[in-house]
Amino acid sequence: MSDDTTSQPRRAISHKTMAGAVTDALRERILSGALLPGEQLRQDALAEEFAVSRIPVREALLQLEASGLVKIMPHRGAVVSSLSVDEIADVFQLRASLEPQLLLLSARKFTAQDYQELRSLKDEYSVALDHGRVAEWGELNRRFHLALLKHCGRPRSYAIVSSLLQDCDRPTRLQLSVSGDVARADMEHSEILELCASREFDRAADLLRRHIENAGQSLIEIYRRSATGS
Amino acid sequence: MSDDTTSQPRRAISHKTMAGAVTDALRERILSGALLPGEQLRQDALAEEFAVSRIPVREALLQLEASGLVKIMPHRGAVVSSLSVDEIADVFQLRASLEPQLLLLSARKFTAQDYQELRSLKDEYSVALDHGRVAEWGELNRRFHLALLKHCGRPRSYAIVSSLLQDCDRPTRLQLSVSGDVARADMEHSEILELCASREFDRAADLLRRHIENAGQSLIEIYRRSATGS
DNA sequence: CGCCTAATTATTGTATAAAATATCCATCCG
DNA sequence: CGGATGGATATTTTATACAATAATTAGGCG
């Protein structure tokens, strides 16, 4: 009853359609790194594996292409799309530009229950951090950021940010598990929350912008250091 | 050789696949207003009309849903999505926020040939304006704005703006043919171009922002006046 | 008379199979 | 010996056929 704006992250069960189930399964595999960028996705192999025909697989691939996670070339099949450093930088710059604006609109409408939900999300995040579960980390980070913007009243912007966060997820999960940046992110989340609670919205928005810029720069550096992704 | 970033507006021929052809045909119908918002799209009807099976139609609908032009509800079919006033306002606010940023990045890299291309686009726009061809107007407006951002070097942002412009197209075509705003837009396009040519990039970006805000507010007012969209 | 229930129907979703297209490799010609 | 050309193969794309789901309507009950 709360996060239906983009209809994307349906949890585990409740799949009205096979195509939807395959979509979610494939997305999870890509985001978790089980399927690496550049890897080819053959329809019949996936169909056999999921015990469905190739049509739901095709539709799943189409939806994932729309999300930017795979790239389809006509008659040549689908591959897991690899974000270049430029594209990752762009995604973070977009977030840094959009999210603070939306936070200003959203934060004024937070209710007590919203704060409760946000704190609970942040706590889950901290727990996941302690246990080193990177997969959960990405998902929780995404949900926290989206929850911050819940009441922004700008559906299209919200959907775009949601999609950007999804694209951040993968490179982050792949490369960031080593660094200490998740801990800093956790702290910054807390600060943002406190600033909102004390109604210092402008400062909260400003911190959010820096928070995103920090995460972006850190990730870019890691990428640059490890290799030169095409 | 110039506008392949989002792989969307392929002109007429050169369709490697049926699904692609159907996608383009349907998109044109929706953008041109031949299919009105809220209208239901039945798969077998479309399949018969295009003389293909339902599968290419299904894939076309999926791609159009990714573009935001139709909404698919599982087991309930697809309808032409109607943008609410809020959503339209959001689209314009996003454009007003993003395009000036990107113009600053892009304009510095304009070559003589780029200016030639831009002026040619603007002239086509003026001609279409004189002849009252609204359909061309939307397309040319979109191409002009995209050409302005050509060298921004931010692929994801560029793709998003491209999609936003597409979404502007439809409401604009439907509702703006009466007003005199297209003429003003034409003039503002010229001014933006001149400011770029004289390397006053900041002023150009600022004018672009106001240009978009003007267009948005004008459109919103027309919407509000004519009826209350859901 | 209104409302709930059950069968009917229309429409979407999926499976299987055939057609089309691109890639790869061997062969042939210059 | 190099490059091009033709066919074989693997894969995607489309068509046909079937199953499942949601809307609708008719019928029965309170």
Image (tube, coloured by chain):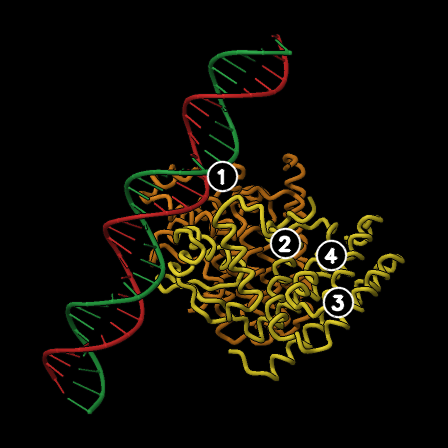
Chain colours: A yellow, B orange, C red, D green
Identify the residue position indicated by label 4 in the image.
A102
Query: Which of labels 3 and 1 is toward the front?
Result: 1
Q: Is circle 4 on the same chain as circle 1?
A: no
Q: Are marks 4 and 2 in contact (CB under 8 Å)?
A: no
Q: Measuring 47% from the left and 71% from the top, which residue is drawn there?
A: A38
Distance between mark 3 and mark 1 Cα atoms: 41 Å
Secondary structure under the numbered disc 1 in the rendered image: loop
Asked whether B55 or A97 is in front, the reply is B55
Left or right of residue A17, residue A8 in this image: right
Distance between mark 3 and mark 4 Cα atoms: 11 Å
Distance between mark 4 and mark 1 Cα atoms: 34 Å
Q: Residues within 10 Å of mark 1 (few under 14, many from 20)?
A: few
Q: Mark 4 belongs to which amino acid?
A: Leu
Distance between mark 3 and mark 2 Cα atoms: 18 Å
The chain letter under disc 4 is A
Identify the residue position indicated by label 1 in the image.
B75
Query: Which of labels 4 and 2 is toward the front?
Result: 2
Q: Mark 3 belongs to which amino acid?
A: Arg
Q: Is circle 3 on the same chain as circle 4?
A: yes
Identify the residue position indicated by label 2 in the image.
A159
In terms of sequence position, does the residue under pointer 3 or pointer 4 come before the other? 4
Identify the residue position indicated by label 3 in the image.
A209
Secondary structure under the numbered disc 3 in the rendered image: helix
Distance between mark 4 and mark 2 Cα atoms: 12 Å
* The quadrant where residue A165 appears: bottom right
* The quadrant where residue A125 appears: bottom right
In terms of sequence position, does the residue under pointer 4 or pointer 2 come before the other? 4
Q: Are marks 3 and 1 in contact (CB under 8 Å)?
A: no
In terms of sequence position, does the residue under pointer 3 or pointer 2 come before the other? 2
Query: Which of labels 1 and 2 is toward the front?
Result: 1
Q: Position of residue D18 (x, y in %)?
A: 34, 38
Q: Are marks 3 and 2 in contact (CB under 8 Å)?
A: no
